[in-house]
Amino acid sequence: MAHAHTPASPLFDAQRLDAANFAALEPYFAALLARTVTSAHDLEQLILARSELDAFVAERMADIYIATTRNTEDKVAEAAYLAFVRDVDPQLKPIASALDKKISSSEFAAQLPLQRYEVLLRGLRVDIELFREANIPLETQLAELDQKYNQIAGRMTVEFDGETRTMPQMARFLEETDRSLRERAWQAVNARRLQDRDAIDDIYDQMITLRHQLAVNAGFDNFRDFQHRRFKRFDYSPADCISMHEAIAMHLVPIQRRLDLERAKALSVSPLRPWDLAVDTQGRKPLRPFEGAQALVDGCSRMFHEMGSGLGDMFDTLREGDCLDLDSRPAKAPGGYQYQRQYSRRPFIFMNAAGMHRDLVTMVHEAGHAFHSLLSMSDPVLEYRSAPTEFSEVASMSMELLTLPYHGQFYSPDECARALRERLEKFPTIMTWIATIDAFQHWVYTNPGHTRAARTIAWRALIKRFGNEISWDDCEEVRDSMWQRQLHLFGMPFYYIEYGIAETGAIQMWIHSRRDQSQTLANYRKGLALGGSRPLPELFSAAGLRLDLGSSLMEELAREVDRELVGA
């Protein structure tokens, strides 16, 4: 598809303009608001000019956020982050809303090419519909609370066997064949987590209250329905999510629990305990694909070059321009992410590698996001340089599966077979957990006045419905607070069902790749190159996939994966 060109003359001096200073930015946004629009061409030029300025500001915010996660104890970075969310972002939001109105309500909007601009315009109309001045300070408070949660999580370390270790580093011990060592590590980690249980509960309670008020201010009965609308979920509803929970309970929970029983039998333990879930059932040593971030990057480069379809060349662009921060260290925020710096069009990958197999999985997952950013980065419309999250996660989760035949860059053939089985077992595991977290949020936000005790009862019911076939005896407090480690609940509420929808796409991609890998990779690139320029069902279709939250697709995928697991 041919795109309109970005304006030829620079709108601002990127070297001089301070995007973290609202007073410096305001004249540029005011100039956009004051532009005279007398034709569809003028309106299109306004859209493109706004995209350029928004991308510049978005990159500054990206750099500030990245700095806070790289070192949660960096006071300068923290101050810059708080200054942006308190001083800059709240003042930009009314201007953004005014620009949304100027563009979407223009008499020339109907004259823009429908195929090109329908997704942008419908999104702007939702933003206008939901915007409330009264919500700006509430969003600021929520951003500060999320920062507080990240700081608490980032400070968590454990003294174990004479060393101070981060939580990601402690996870290595849960793969060890010595059961007593695994239990000691698990108990040490969770004793540390429980120290902050009340503080995290306090944060979450405040967030629930603030989010409910956001929804009420915007005319909604509850935050769930408000957030679904804010996420622009045009193609499925909360009721569809509940149907997906039911499909997972019907088709995947039985597989997960059968695998648990097989695990208990293989390990000769009864009952299975929480520290028995990551160890290899045949007593083999944990998969250790690399030592140090450089070995991880080098191996991934070779792997993507071997796969072809230009993936290796794209991956190699990440080696320069401060695009990677991979090793785990104290005070680094938990988790992993890919963040596109929208003005320079350079992806950034953040993770906490400790030499484990799951670190390799995280790396290829985030590389999938980076490929998405790189393949769609030429679109001059900022909103189209990122896709709906349901499809963004197809880009990343598919890479977890499509790279499996090339893990010989890290493993022996036997180890490659282990990695394949581990990823396929992840399908029921991740889907049951996604259903748990999403259903939990449905309950939390449709019962906003609940007590902590009621929340715990609701969580226990979900663990009973979707959880593993394991014993929690003497570990009930850990079970009851497990949700606290799911960072999406704090910083990105309701952004989790997308992983489940995307996983159904990724499993379809894996099934197709076994029949025709070359065509599958071509479809992968075709879908990703669209960015967010088309509706979600069309993005799935372009990649050769079906978008379906119901029982029929879930049953089909469960049967295909289970057939491979039983035969392996």
Image (cartoon, helix red, strand yellow):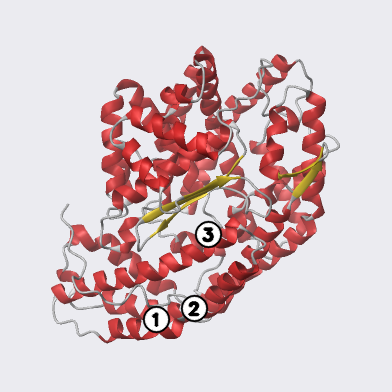
Residues at circles 2 and 3 in contact by the CB criterion of under 8 Å: no
SS class, disc 1: helix
Taking the spot 50% from the left edge, 62% from the top edge, the residue there is 227
Residue 28 appears left or right of 363: left
Q: Residue at x 26, y 41 (%)?
A: 526
Pointer 1 with pointer 2, Cβ within 8 A: yes
The part of the image, by quadrant, that contains residue 109 is bottom left
The answer to whether residue 405 is above or below residue 532 is: above
Q: Nearer the viewer, residue 4 or 28?
A: 28
* Residue 261 image position (x, y, % from top left): 68, 20
Which residue type does callout 1 highlight? Answer: Leu
Q: Eyeballing the image, is 443 above or below 53?
A: above
Q: What residue is drawn where x is 58% and y is 25%?
A: 255
- In the image, taking residue 440 as reference, residue 41 lies left or right, namely left
Q: Residue furthest top?
A: 567
Tell me the CA gap for discs 1 and 3: 21 Å
Residue at x-position 53% and y-position 29%: 251
Q: Is any part of residue 301 visible from this angle?
A: yes
Q: Residues within 10 Å of mark 3 (few under 14, many from 20)?
A: many
Residue at numbered disc 1: 25
Q: Position of residue 330 (x, y in %)?
A: 69, 51
Q: Which residue matches tag 2?
A: 88
In percent of width and height, residue 272 lies at: 75, 25
Give the residue pinned by disc 3.
66
Identified by mark 2, the residue type is: Val
Question: Which circle's residue, 2 or 3, is located before the other in the chain?
Answer: 3
Q: Residue furthest right?
A: 474
Secondary structure of the residue carrying tag 3 is: helix
| Local crowd size for mark 2, using a 10 Å CA cut-off: few (<14), some (14–19), many (≥20) | many
